[in-house]
Image (tube, rainbow, N blue to C red):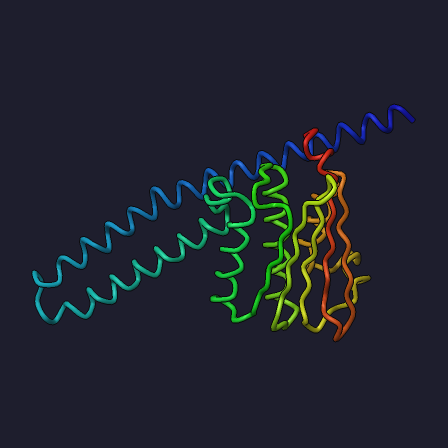
Amino acid sequence: MENTLETENRLRFLTCRLIETRENECKRIALELHDEMGQALTAASFNLSRLRNDIPESCRELLADTVSIVDNLSDQIRNLSLDLRPSMLDDLGLIPTVRWYLNRFTKRTGIKTALKTVGLDDYRNETLEITIYRVVQESLNNVLKHAMAKNVEISLKHENSRFTGFIQDDGRGFDINKIFEANDNKHVGLLSMKERLFLLGGTFEIQSGKARGTRINIEIPLSFVHKE
């Protein structure tokens, strides 16, 4: 029994380290995309635009198209960098980053979002912050891809040494039993989030049904997070 428990604890430790390594790699790549590729594309667009008055009239339309392509690529690089790891998560913390992400999500999709928070404005813990941010991110990705929802409500609370929250949409819902079928690839991200919370001693519960929307409930004991 002790050997089994020791093996489980070792496996949990190694999995946590793997997730931490992956997050650090995401942070590194996001920074390089922004600082190197992003700035290089901005400079390229600026230099191309300066050529407008130095080239024949017949070439200016082609130049404008090229500048547009470079600017679009720059926007894609910026969005990819933000999706990998927004720097504001480290600089400003969880709640400002989630607010920013929800505003960005609404502008890009038209799906309305509402956020309610309790006791988290001054709370900082990197492990908790990146975990909750990823849960919100994956939940909204799931809403966008599958739910056909018009509204999403998010609640995040820090009370009595526990973190609790939910993400609820008014979409078409789904049969949660299908998540555990071997051939279901639609909700792999949600299962990944469930495993991630389990590693922190937390719970991840999905409530859904056809035409009833979907609600994801999460809970994490902060005492467990502080031991990590």
Name the spot of residue 42 as percent of width and height, x first. Answer: 27, 52
The residue nearer to you, when weighing 63 against 128, is 128
| Percent position of residue 193, x then y | 68, 49
Total number of numbered discs in the rendering: 0
The structure residue drawn at horizontal position 15% and vertical position 68%, both measured from the top left corner, is 60
Closer-to-camera residue (115/72): 115
Is 124 left, or right, of 1 in this rendering? left
Image coordinates for residue 225, horizontal then vertical, percent: 69, 35
Residue 202 placement, left or right of 52: right
As drawn, is 44 to the left or to the right of 132? left
| Quarter in which the N terminus is drawn | top right
* Residue 148 in the image: above or below residue 24: below
Tell me the residue at 72%/70% (across/down).
213
Give the camera-side residue of 101 and 62: 101
Residue lying at 50% horizontally and 45% vertically, measured from the top left: 85
In the rendered image, the quadrant that contains the C terminus is top right
Identify the residue at horizontal 62%, vertical 53% (top origin).
117
Query: Which of the two residues, 86 or 219, is positioned nearer the viewer here?
Result: 219
Left-right relation of 95 to 215: left
Residue lying farthest to the bottom in this orientation = 211
